[in-house]
Amino acid sequence: MPVANVVAMRTTHPLAPYVRGAVRLEELPDGFVVPYRFFPEQMEHFSNIGRQDRAVATSGVVLDFVTNGTEISLGCRIVRPLNRKHVLYRAVMAGSTNEGMVPFGAAEEGNVDGIDLVVDGRLVATVAPVDGELRFAFQNDAREELEVRIYLPSIMQVAIGNLRTNGTLKPVPSHGYLLALGDSITQGFICGKPSFAYPAQVANTMGLDLVNQAVAGHVFDEDALGGFSLWRGEQPELIVVAYGTNDWSHRRSSDEIEGAASAYLDRVSWYFPKVPIYVLSPLWRADEHDAKPCGRPLTWMHQMIGRICSRHHNMHVVDGYHGIPKDPALFADDVLHPGPACMGLVADLLLEAMCSDSMDLHIAKRVAKRTLGGAGKDTSEFFSPEEQVDRLISLRDHSPEEHPEFDRLVRTIWRLRQPDGCPWDREQTHQSITKNMVEEAYEAVDAIAQQDDEHLCEELGDVLEQVLLHAQIADDRDAFNIDDICHGLNQKLVRRHPHVFGDLGGAGASAATAQSAEEALDRWDEVKRSEREQRGTQDGAARGLLDSVPRSLPALMQAQKISSRAAKAGFEWDTVDDVWDQVAEERAEFEREEPGTDRAVEEFGDILFALVNVARRCGIDAEEALAASNAKFRRRWKAMEQMQDLEGASTEELNRLWCEVKSHE
């Protein structure tokens, strides 16, 4: 790819390395090139249906380069001019001069299409497309390297050549592309400024190149997608489809409209099964109440498109009708084609849908980096605390994105509980599988103790199966579902980590810090106590200190949690020696009881409880300590079995073997 580094304005640069948004370039004998947005198969189809003049327009095509210069010149030749006698052209110009409004093109009086110069993301100038040399000047006193984009007209066809600059010139690397499909609204028809068309705004926000394959007056049919297989090797990062009102305005039945829409959108999803696709349903139009052949209201279009999108996991419908104000002043022709301001509203509508869609986190990450990552940007008006936290997390490199296997697993569990699913799974209740949850959790803990990653992976899967099965059982009776579980857990994690998320956690502790694990646990407990107090107030009855300690926990673990809660409330011994004295006292009480009686059992429990308090005061987890002792005993007994057959061995022999194994350790 040639890169020129020259300063003379007389030097002409080859255009191919700088053109973005064209699928092919036609080189003319004099060195000029004509960009095309469509493949030959598509152009043949559009010619057959009388839309070739719209398809050859250069909408979305840009020259994109980096320069340290201050002047750019470009040769322009109009191949297919603007039809100034067109009814829409006359309508726009008639409306644009009312009450002193500036014509939408703003490049010259009577212009509804232009060429934009955008420097470092800022529109510097819009000029009229004319035959001859177009010259642009911009401020760059420091001679910094700036990214410059020259947007070609939306509804005219031009040839370009003779690119010159008084500075360096380097092509900008491709960053992936957004594919825009649709009709005249997507093409930017009579918007006036090509950089204001909503596909251009969305692509810029996402940091993507744009391929705009929209056609004014386009009827949505499969033949318009000819040549798409050529994109299989380099698929778009994102697809936006604006399903306009042409079908609604001209087709005679709703079945015909839905059939065409289904075939078109199904084919797009088939070509790009892993690409997020956002389908914008038709915007409001001033003549929506006029009689239409299909006999359906305009709002039906959104419902129809929603039904189609629901069949595809990668396709999302965006409500254009209710998302854009119903104000004729926002439309260039006062009827249905958005002006520049309305184009911005459409872009915002799509970006908001992308940013809020958890299914496409990598897309939301792109939006967040460019819209929420700016210094001082206040997002609280638009997003909940959890959403704000998620977007800040998504800005971090290598943050997790999609987990399609999780969704597949959720669907599998759902299928097992269906009427024609597994008889065993269908019969289960929360109560019937309670013990399964405990057993699977212990098996996972055992795999951790064995440091067996493969076994642990399997056992954690079994634990997850229990969670999902309980969630599906609850969902079947409309109590809650897996999304409620995830949402509630995420809220709690954010809320109980004020030292990480500050005020976004909603705990009112933005200044909270934690430099150690102990301090982090203190922050957690502070928020937890506040939650308990709030719940008690809401319930009308105070909750006890120990109410949140699960009674189903293993007794040893439960004892340590109970004693820890009581100690934090001030019910504590002064020293660990005092706790040992308590152990001795409990032993004495046990020895005074008749062996085998209920009182003896109770007193022995008191001994264990006192010993748990010794462990707690010494910083020992009693459950883990006993588990380690169990493992040690298992290990030593296994070693004894390997030394000899223990069946029939005397107590003296067993003790000898035990001491031998112990000495070897």
Image (cartoon, rainbow, N blue to C red):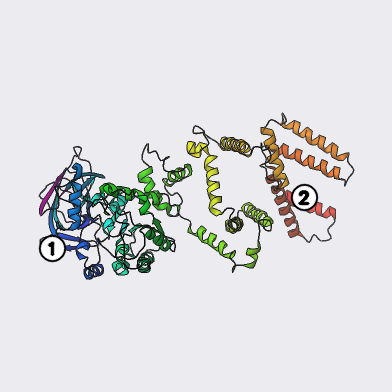
Q: Is residue 335 visible?
A: yes
In the image: residue 106, left or right of residue 254: left
Q: Residues within 10 Å of mark 2 (few under 14, many from 20)?
A: few
x, y (%) of residue 140? 19, 39
In the picture shown, does residue 28 fall above or below 570?
A: below
Instruction: Using the rendered view, name the quadrant where residue 251 is placed.
Output: bottom left
Label of residue 472 in the image: none
In the image: residue 348, left or right of residue 102: right
x, y (%) of residue 634? 72, 54
Instruction: Using the rendered view, name the quadrant where residue 562 is placed.
Output: top right
Give the residues in magenta: 127-145
x, y (%) of residue 204? 30, 49
Residue at 53% of width from left, 40% of height from top? 495
Helix, strand or loop at mark 1: loop
Residue carrying label 2 = 659
Of residue 177 and residue 578, the one placed in the foreground of this image is 177
Q: Amino acid at mark 1?
A: Leu
Q: Residue furthest top?
A: 574
Separation of residues labelled 2 and 1 (CA atoms)? 96 Å
Q: Main secondary structure of the magenta part?
A: loop
Instruction: Using the rendered view, name the quadrant where residue 591 is placed.
Output: top right
In the image: residue 317, left or right of residue 179: right
> Nearer the N terminus, badge 2 or badge 1?
1
Q: Amino acid at mark 2?
A: Cys
Residue carrying label 1 = 28
